[in-house]
Amino acid sequence: RKEVEQDPGPFNVPEGATVAFNCTYSNSASQSFFWYRQDCRKEPKLLMSVYSSGNEDGRFTAQLNRASQYISLLIRDSKLSDSATYLCVVNMWDTGRRALTFGSGTRLQVQP
Amino acid sequence: DVKVTQSSRYLVKRTGEKVFLECVQDMDHENMFWYRQDPGLGLRLIYFSYDVKMKEKGDIPEGYSVSREKKERFSLILESASTNQTSMYLCAIGGGDQPQHFGDGTRLSIL
């Protein structure tokens, strides 16, 4: 089983749509969670951290469900510029691993 | 703003060459990482360092070595480049319970 699993997509949605991605993680002791965005042929960039109580940043909402070990990202009012790959990222600090563990990403294509 | 600088955006080398990829940070962070990213395989950790002269193997260290002589600089070395090392290489800092920040990446082609 992969440590962080995501649906690779692609998710093809029209502009203005609401879209949600889920991600599951295997390590129940994980403490830190993030969503990154990666544009084609560019480096991953931090989109937002994910907090236990859920958090919002403009059109983006992140949720954490520890009991079921998944995190989600909701994008409202999708823009063409939201087209990218979204990476779910988890820490595995209890294993002594300092590097974060990245999912393989979910590709989003927003269409006009 | 976090600055992680990789020495080259694009690099073309020949099979058997020794290749050096350099990464410099301005955040005085202890942790530095080297990844490679290939289509369909996601990000894979090659090596990381948590202090000067300290290094640990990641998930795919074979064919690579690293050097960290100064805190701000972390080098990835391909001892004898092979075509299966053609990839996008990404340096990052941070980690632990904090986000990681990446450099722009180096697209390396081995001919």
Image: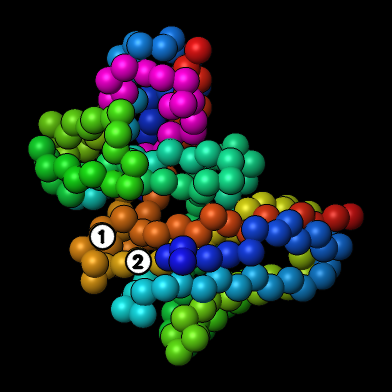
Secondary structure beneath dot 1 equals strand
Please report the residue visible at 10 percent of the width from the left and 38 percent of the height from the top: B53
* Residue at the image position 12 percent from the left and 42 percent from the top: B54
- Most foreground residue, A52 or B2: A52
Question: Label 1 belongs to which residue?
Answer: A97
Amino acid carrying label 2: it is Asn
Q: Name the residue under label 2.
A: A91
Q: Tell me the number on the disc at residue A19.
A: none
Q: Residue at x 51, y 78 (%)?
A: A70
Q: Which chain carries label 1?
A: A
Determine the image quadrant of residue B60.
top left
In magenta stretch: residue A55: no
Cα separation, mark 1 vs mark 2, equals: 8 Å
Which residue is more in the foreground, B8 or A57?
B8
Inspect this view and state whether residue B9 appears: no
Against B59, residue B95 (above or below) is below
Chain of the residue under the numbered disc 2 shown in the image: A
- Per the rendered image, the range of residues in magenta is B76-92
Residue in the image at 39% along x and 41% along y: B35
Residue A68 showing in the rendered view? yes
> Vertically, is B87 above or below A25?
above
Residue A55 in percent (x, y) is at 52, 80
* Helix, strand or loop for disc 2: strand
